[in-house]
Amino acid sequence: MTHSLSPRQRECLLWVARGKTYSETAQILGLSFGTVKTNLDAVRYKMDCALLPQATAHAIALGILSVDELQISGSK
């Protein structure tokens, strides 16, 4: 299984990892709900993870995402 994510897949995963819903992520990125779902389904498949929290942890371990990125500006 490849662990390379497209820039859009990475972006969708980042927003969901920050606690946003699929709908909120879609609104932030100017995408449809279905497009966000498709991208996140691809993330779970590529990471061989059943759940997005697992995929997030895996992405951090592989250096695809950093813990610092998970913080939204202005939040503690």
Image (cartoon, grey):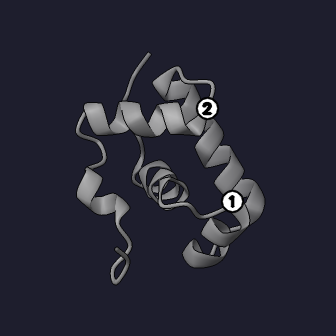
Q: Is residue 75 above or below residue 13?
A: below
| In this picture, residue 51 sits left or right of residue 75 | right
Residue extending farthest front: 76
Q: Quadrant of the N terminus?
A: top left
| In this picture, residue 38 sits left or right of residue 59 | right
Q: Is residue 14 above or below residue 1?
A: below
Q: Quadrant of residue 69?
A: bottom left
Q: Which residue is mark 1?
A: 22
| In this picture, residue 37 sits left or right of residue 47 | right
The Cα atoms of the two marked residues, 2 and 1, are separated by 14 Å
Q: Which residue is mark 2?
A: 51
| Residue placed most toward the observer, 9 or 54 | 54
**Mark 2, residues whose alpha carbon is within 10 Å: few (<14), some, or many (≥20)?**
some
Q: Can you give x and y, in whole percent of width and height, for residue 11 in the image?
A: 45, 58
Q: Is any atom of residue 5 visible in this view? A: yes
Q: Can you give x and y, in whole percent of width and height, for residue 51 in the image?
A: 61, 32
| Figure label count | 2
Residue occupying the point 63% across, 24% down? 50
Residue occupying the point 69% across, 56% down? 35
- Mark number, residue 3: none
Mark 1 element type: helix
| In this picture, residue 50 sits left or right of residue 68 | right
